[in-house]
Image (spheres, rainbow, N blue to C red):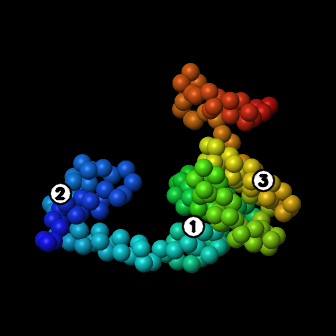
Amino acid sequence: MSAPDPIREAVRQLRRLPGVGEKTATRLVYWLLRAPEGTPDELAQALTRLAAEVRSCTVCGNLTGTDPCTLCADGRRDPTVLCVVEHPQDVLAFERSGEFRGRYHVLHGAISPLDGVGPGDLNLRSLLDRLRGGEVREVIVATDPDVEGDATALYLARLLGDVGVEVTRLAHGISVGTEIEYADAVSLARALQNRQKLT
C-alpha cells in the first residue's frame, strides 16, 4: 500500500478546521507550497507549541501560556468587578473594546440541555471559590444573548443570589449603526426592556 499523497493529506487535515471546506483547504495548501521557504515549518511549530504550552489559567479559566494569565496577574485591574463570559474568545472581544478594566471568569460553555451541557459541565466551582474571598463586589454576567446564554444567566443569578455580590447582566438591544426599520423583533423588544433614562 502506497503512502497517502501529501497534498491530499494536507487538504484533508485542513478541512477539519471549522469553516474550512474543500476549496479553501486546497487553496491554503497551494499557498503554503508557494510561500517563502520555512513558512510551513514555522506554522507547524506554532501549532505544536499551541498544543503543548496553552492551558487554562487556574484563576479565571482563560486559555494562556502562563499561569496565572497576564490579565489575572495585572495588578492595575479592578479586582472588585468580575466579568463572567462563556468562552476565551469573549475575553478578547472585551479587551478589544478597551472599556473593561476588571477581572474575568471563563465558563467554557453555556447551559444547553439539548446538547447535554449542564451546570456541572461549566467552570462554576472556581467561580464560587473566587467569590468566597470577599473581594468581588459585582459580577457582570456577559453570556451570549441567546437561549443558552439566557439560561446560563438565570442560573448564575440564582446561584449567586446568596453570595453577597451584585449580579448584573449586559444590556441587549439594537446594535449601534442599525436602522430601526431593519432591526429584528427580538432586538427591538430587548431594546425597549433595557431602555435608559435620559433626564
Q: Residue at x 54, y 53 (%)?
A: 93
Q: Secondary structure at mark 2?
A: helix
**Gap between marks 2 and 3 measured at Cα:** 51 Å
Looking at the image, can residue 100 be seen? no
Which residue is denoted by mark 1 in the rendering? 62
- Depth check, front residue: 178 or 74: 178
Give the quarter of the image for residue 105.
Answer: bottom right
Q: CA separation, marks 2 and 1?
A: 34 Å
Label 1, secondary structure: give it: loop
In the rendered structure, which amino acid carries the disc numbered 1? Answer: Asn
Kind of residue sitting beneath label 3: Ala
Name the spot of residue 186 as percent of width and height, x first: 63, 31
Mark in the foreground, 3 or 1: 3
Q: Residue at x 64, y 52 (%)?
A: 113
Give the quarter of the image for residue 28.
bottom left
Q: Residues within 10 Å of mark 1 (few under 14, many from 20)?
A: many
101 versus 65 height, above or below? above
- What residue is pinned by disc 3? 157
Nearest the camera: 14 or 188?
Answer: 14
Q: Disc number at residue 30? A: 2
Q: Is residue 7 above or below residue 50?
A: above
Q: Quadrant of the C terminus?
A: top right
Q: Residue 117 at what x, y percent from top left?
A: 62, 57
Q: Single out the residue that lies furthest toward the front.
A: 1
Q: Earlier in the sequence, mark 2 or mark 3?
A: 2
Residue 134 location, x and y as percent?
A: 82, 70
Is the residue under label 1 in contact with that under label 3 (CB below 8 Å)? no
Mark with earlier residue (3, 1): 1
Which residue sits at x=35%, y=70%?
A: 47
For marks 2 and 1 on the same chain, the one whose residue lies earlier in the sequence: 2
